[in-house]
Amino acid sequence: QTVVTQEPSLTVSPGGTVTLTCASSTGAVTSGYSPSWFQQKPGQAPRSLIYSTSNKHSWTPARFSGSLLGGKAALTLSGVQPEDEAEYYCLLYFGDTQVWVFGGGTKLTVL
Amino acid sequence: EVQLLESGGGLVQPGGSLRLSCGASGFTFSSSAMSWVRQAPGKGLEWLSSITESGGGTHYPDSVKGRFTISRDNSKNTLYLQMNSLRPEDTAVYYCAKDGDWLPCGNWGQGTLVTVSS
């Protein structure tokens, strides 16, 4: 069974920079996995932030960026704001089985 | 503005069935692939199914394959999820989402709660 792994929790100070990562049990994550990133705040539906590794939506704040880092997908927040406190999920595509798999989520605390 | 509105959730007994609907507006529904995602209470997101624009292609993870069926009616701008042989562990908020080209779940509905319990 394919597992996608994220850091369970991270803490960052306001104005700081933090990188969340997303790993696959099958090996290195490449652009072929089409990594996406989602933000979810308590009581709200998730919101898409990044797709196809590094592409942003019109509503994605400039401080969010996506990349590949050391065999993982990565979401970097630069100049973190208090409103960035949320749960963040990555999503990877596994072409051999044509399924998408979410990571377990990272709870980001801004403190 | 893209709008997605799920309905059909509620309380169902173990072993029962339920059909969820997702009404879409604000975009050309027949030109968009769609997905269903769920979230159990206090847990993470789980991708359940995707369907192509025409409805001719569908995909599922092994966890729901054979029990859940995704479908769509492009004349009604509506997405469906038929859920059979429901189990207590299927209790979750179910979301529908609009996909794009290598852009999964770009827009989300607010979700509908399904509770499987006797």
Image (cartoon, rainbow, N blue to C red):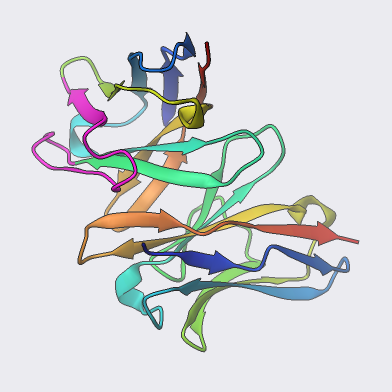
Measured along the vertical axis of the image, is residue A75 above or below residue B50?
below
Residue B34 within the magenta-colored segment of the rendering? no
Apparent side of residue B70 relative to residue A42 in the rendered image (left or right) = left
Residue at the spot 41% in from the left edge and 12% down from the top edge: B8
Find residue B113 and report its horizontal and vertical position in percent: 53, 20
Which span is picked out in magenta? B52-74
The answer to whether any part of residue A40 appears in the image is: yes
B43 versus B114 height, above or below: below
- Residue that protrudes farthest toward the bottom in the picture: A70
The residue positioned 24% from the left and 30% from the top of the image is B70
Front residue of A5/B100: it is A5
Where residue B28 appears, x then y in whole percent? Answer: 25, 31
What residue appears at the point 30 percent right and 58 percent down from the top-left corner?
B102
Q: Is residue B111 above or below residue A97?
A: above
Q: Is residue B4 above or below residue A19?
A: above
Report x, y in % for residue A70: 51, 89
Visible residue check, residue B109: no
**Image quarter in which the N terminus of chain A is found:** bottom left
Q: Nearer the viewer, residue A51 or B26?
A: A51
Q: Quadrant of residue A82?
A: bottom right
**The C terminus of chain A lies in quadrant:** bottom right
